[in-house]
Image (cartoon, helix red, strand yellow):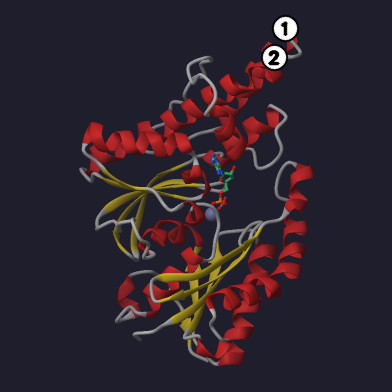
Amino acid sequence: KNNTYILAIESSCDDTAAAVLLNDKTLSNVVAGQAVHKQYGGVVPELASRAHQQNIVPVVHEALRLANVKKEDLAAIAFTSGPGLMGSLLVGTSFAKSLAMGLNIPLIDVNHMQAHILAHFIEEENYSKPTFPFLAMTISGGHTQIVKVSNYFEMEVLGQTIDDAVGEAFDKSAKILGLPYPGGPLIDKYAKLGNPKAYKFTKPKVDGLNFSFSGFKTAVLYFYQREIAKDPQFVTNNLNDICASIQYTIVEILMDKIKKAVKETGIKQVAIGGGVSANSGIRDALKTAEGKYGWKTYIPKFEYTTDNAAMIGIVGYLKYSAENLENTGFKETRVMAQ
Ligand code: KG4
Ligand code: ZN
């Protein structure tokens, strides 16, 4: 098991992705995005599955080619089994199953959200790996969770959103402002040029370590309607300040909860994962917390923030090399030897 090549496939939402890992190192990490959803202001499941069907073969070919690895050298195939859109998942799942069967190698299923967390264990220069236990905040278009990670396969959800995910809060706010999907990265871009205290949005009051973002989205909508009625040019003239204020509030909501989680658990190691961990506001806030509160924080390399297959590959590798899979305590573990 010294030189383990693993092909990983991810197709849970609107990115078709494949990666090849040599042990815990990424040899290739290919992502084909889907521009088709832009005009609809969100992911259209039916169109996503169709695009996956078109992309899956070329993306896998490209991942193998860039890694300079032949199919015959693969030790196993890892794939995302969920959570995600069923039609999208089916494309990657069926492809992975058939290929593993054809090559007569093990097939390893991977939970997408665990992968966002375990992406921190991909070997990368200048990035250190968390030690157990640590807290992970998974922040994406579909999820917002605080997870206590006691081991690779021992995770406990301490809190999560009771309505929208934080990525949706970014994307829906952006949509209100007339920005295209996905609006999160655009809010981030304009926020860098604006004043974060220009406008004030109230923060939701939610018990414990749970989150809520649906009220925030409504607050942005009412704010928009009120201001645009007074001045039709309001958004155009103040876009940077509006985006900076929205981002500031969202980052505060996230930081309030993770601070609470640190206090309650006494764990001062904090990792983030998922698409929103690309956000400059949350990255800066975590870096500041290192000096301010003595935390150790882990921020993923940019290419491992949004959906990718390398993160699926590292979980595949960790499971493949686990001494005893039954002892990983991870009930979704299932390796099917053909
Ligand atoms: O993890 P991901 O690629 O897909 C899901 O599993 O959902 O996350 C996508 C989400 C989108 O909502 C997108 O707007 C958001 O991540 N996102 C960002 C940034 N980059 C991506 N949100 C804020 N700032 C960013 N820089
Ligand atoms: Zn994701």
What residue did someone put label 1 on?
Answer: 230
Disc 1 marks a residue whose amino acid type is Lys
Q: Nearest to the eye among marks 1 and 2: give it.
A: 2
| Residue 208 visible to the viewer | no
Q: How many numbered discs sit on the rendered protein?
A: 2
User: Contact (CB < 8 A) between labels 1 and 2?
Assistant: yes
Disc 2 marks a residue whose amino acid type is Phe
- In percent of width and height, residue 86 lies at 66, 63
**Is 250 in front, or is 179?**
179
* Above/below status of 184 relative to 330: above
| Residue 253 visible to the viewer | yes
How dense is the environment of label 2, judged by Cα within 10 Å: few (below 14), some, or many (20 and up)? some
Residue, x 38% and y 71% (percent of image)?
Answer: 24
Q: Secondary structure at mark 1?
A: helix
Asked whether, in this view, residue 236 is left or right of residue 250, the answer is: right
Q: Quadrant of ligand 2?
A: bottom right
The label on residue 262 is: none
Q: Quadrant of the N terminus?
A: bottom left
Residue, x 26% and y 40% (percent of image)?
Answer: 262
Ligand 1 closer than 8 Å to label 1 CB: no
What residue did someone put label 2 on?
Answer: 234
The quadrant holding residue 188 is top right
- In percent of width and height, residue 213 lies at 53, 33
Between the C-alphas of marks 1 and 2, the distance is 8 Å
* Above/below status of 32 relative to 275: below
- In percent of width and height, residue 54 lies at 76, 69
